[in-house]
Image: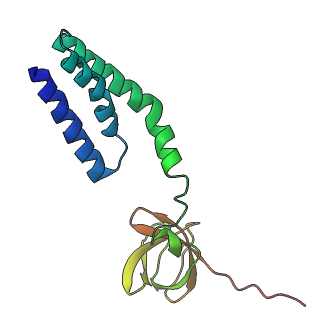
Amino acid sequence: MDFMFYVWIGVIVVSAVIEFITLDMTSIWFTAGAIPSLIMSIIGGVRWEIQLTVFFVLSIVLILSLRKVTKKFLLRNAKEKTNLDALVGKKFKMLTRCDDDEVGTIKVNGVVWNAVPNDGKAIEVGEQIKIVRVDGSKFVVEKITEQKEDK
């Protein structure tokens, strides 16, 4: 067997293992790009420069053309919320004051988290808030205003 045969086997195995570990849909395209080059090395008579060129061109074309489509297709049923996203809309009390310039805190399931107001208006200690969204490592919250209904 040609030396390049072992190179392509190595590329296929390493990129497949990386893809299996990360599940990021990036290195799988290198696996697919290495297969035609592996076949060329088995057939023989094809220079290593051509094999390398085919590998790079095919890998780049696959990444640019199929990565987003494939991720979207594979994730189409992943509508479940993460643990933090599931807290959006839930109500809590402010532990410390927050406003546009000051980050406050709330306690969620026994853990203290940073919270900032959605509209920049101050929210005082003990006021009821609702989580609007998650922004990095903090919650964006808004004060719950009591609305009385006339019947």
Horizontal side, residue 117 vs residue 8: left or right:
right
Report the colour scheme: rainbow
Count of numbered labels shown in the rendering: 0
Residue 112 drawn above or below residue 5? below
Closer to the camera, 98 or 34? 34
Residue 4 picture location, percent across and down: 13, 22
> Would residue 112 be found to the left or right of residue 9 on screen?
right
Of residues 141 and 83, the one nearer the viewer is 83
The residue drawn where x is 33% and y is 39% is: 28
State whether residue 123 is above or below residue 118: below
* Image position of 7 with respect to 106: above or below: above
| Quadrant of the rendering where the C terminus is positioned | bottom right
Please provide percent x and percent y for residue 68.
47, 39
Q: Furthest residue to the right?
A: 151
Point 55% across, 52% down: residue: 76
Percent position of residue 31, x then y? 29, 34
Q: Quadrant of residue 101?
A: bottom left
Q: In front here: 60 or 13?
A: 13
Please name the residue shown 52% across and 83% down the image. 124
Does residue 139 lie above or below 32 as drawn?
below
Image quarter in which the N terminus is found: top left
Residue 92 image point, x, y percent: 52, 84
**Quarter of the figure with residue 38:** top left
Q: Residue at x 46, y 80 (%)?
A: 97
Q: Nearer the viewer, residue 40 or 18?
A: 40
Determine whether, in the image, residue 66 is placed left or right of residue 17.
Answer: right
